[in-house]
């Protein structure tokens, strides 16, 4: 009997230690995001780890990212007809579920009757999660980047306070710095805000300067398609010691052709280029397992 109690005690202690380590990881990522001199690279799972058997923006995709020890999970938010916030990329349920219609025209109850599809289009048993469900699952375990939520962030923030997750969320948007400060200012000391800047825009450099002057953001999400654009290299110097640089490797048009698909053939010329030549310290990917493996071999991820 004593042996059984001892084994049970060890199991409980192990579970407690595991939870504590997960919470420490989340806190460590937030600390890294606030360090403009961070030397390693944070990994963001786009819509969760959906290349597993989990549908995009599902609780299973979030949990898979947590289990992989990914740093940040990117999630998309939309509002239902009855004002509830759900996780989905598109403004309709057509592509990702077995239903049809605009999210804005459907109630939460109607949406909860649907089943999500996996990346091959197969219907699964997974349901569309609410933002609250996603936040509670991620709480203390992984940072969350919310996309498409700017227009109703007051409601999002109410959920962050309700769930105790204000310190684990990254908001983003491409609005001018003055507008962000006006709309978002009261949250700036609580939630990390990251501007998104398209470097192919003729006003991109001035936008970055304005953001630095007005908001002093912790990170910039930078995008460019033109491989001859000199700004990406210039931004590495301009933002050094001021803010971290985030690049997306989802599609070629977001990172000058240095995307996940090209990285499968030559990671050094793609992931390595973004890190070494353009100063990326945060990379959002659809292949988090592959990127993590690459970074660990390079000593750029714990």
Image (cartoon, rainbow, N blue to C red):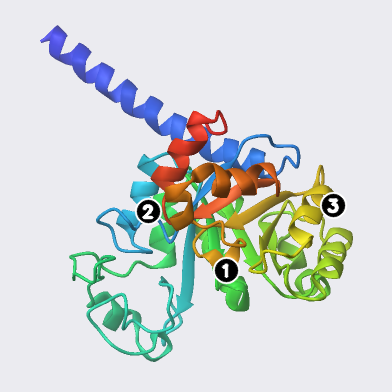
Looking at the rendered structure, the secondary structure element under dot 3 is helix
Disc 3/disc 2 C-alpha distance (Å)? 32 Å
> What residue is shown at x 32% (from left), y 23% (from top)?
14
- In this rendering, does residue 152 appear at all? yes
Q: Residue furthest top?
A: 2
Residue drawn at x 39%, y 91% is 105
Q: Which residue is mark 2?
A: 49
State the residue position of label 1.
Answer: 253
Real-space CA distance between mark 3 and mark 1, rounded to the nearest whole angstrom: 23 Å
Which image quadrant for residue 94?
A: bottom left
What residue occupies the far right of the structure in this picture? 213
**Mark 3 or mark 2, earlier in chain:** 2
Instruction: Work out whether residue 294 or residue 141 is closer to the camera in this orientation and state it.
Output: 294
Residue 251 is situated, as x and y percent measured from the top left of the image, at 50, 65
Please state the horizontal and vertical placement of residue 5, each as a whole percent of the image.
18, 14
- Reply above or below: 12 against 183: above
Question: In this rendering, would 190 be left or right of 214?
Answer: left
Around disc 2, counting alpha carbons within 10 Å, would you say few (fewer than 14), some (14 to 19), or many (20 or more)? Answer: many
Tag 3 residue: 238
Sort mark 1 into few (<14), some (14-19) or many (20+) by Cα contacts within 10 Å. some
């Amino acid at each position: 009997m004593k042996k059984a109690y001892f084994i049970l005690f060890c199991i409980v202690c192990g579970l407690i230690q595991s939870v504590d380590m997960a919470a420490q990881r989340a806190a460590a990522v937030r600390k890294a995001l606030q360090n403009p001199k961070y030397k390693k690279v944070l990994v963001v799972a786009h819509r969760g780890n959906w290349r597993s058997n989990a549908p995009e923006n599902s609780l299973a995709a979030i949990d898979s990212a947590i289990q992989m020890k990914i740093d940040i999970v990117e999630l998309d938010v939309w509002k239902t007809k009855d004002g509830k916030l759900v996780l989905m990329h598109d403004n309709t349920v057509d592509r990702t579920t077995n239903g049809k219609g605009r999210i804005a025209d459907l109630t939460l109850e109607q949406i909860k009757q649907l089943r999500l599809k996996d990346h091959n289009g197969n219907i699964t048993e997974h349901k569309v999660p609410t933002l609250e469900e996603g936040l509670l699952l991620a709480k203390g375990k992984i940072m969350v980047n919310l996309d498409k939520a700017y227009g109703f962030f007051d409601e999002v923030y109410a959920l962050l306070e309700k769930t105790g997750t204000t310190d684990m969320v990254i908001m983003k948007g491409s609005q001018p710095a003055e507008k962000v400060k006006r709309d978002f200012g009261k949250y700036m000391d609580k939630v990390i805000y990251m501007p998104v800047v398209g470097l192919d825009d003729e006003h991109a450099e001035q936008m970055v300067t304005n953001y630095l002057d007005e908001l002093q953001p912790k990170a910039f999400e930078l995008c460019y398609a033109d491989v001859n654009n000199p700004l990406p290299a210039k931004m590495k110097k301009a933002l050094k010691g001021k803010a971290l640089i985030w690049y997306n490797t989802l599609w070629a048009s977001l990172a000058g052709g240095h995307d996940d698909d090209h990285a499968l053939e030559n990671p050094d010329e793609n992931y390595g280029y973004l890190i070494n030549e353009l100063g990326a310290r945060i990379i959002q990917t659809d292949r988090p397992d592959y990127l993590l493996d690459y970074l660990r071999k390079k000593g750029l991820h714990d």
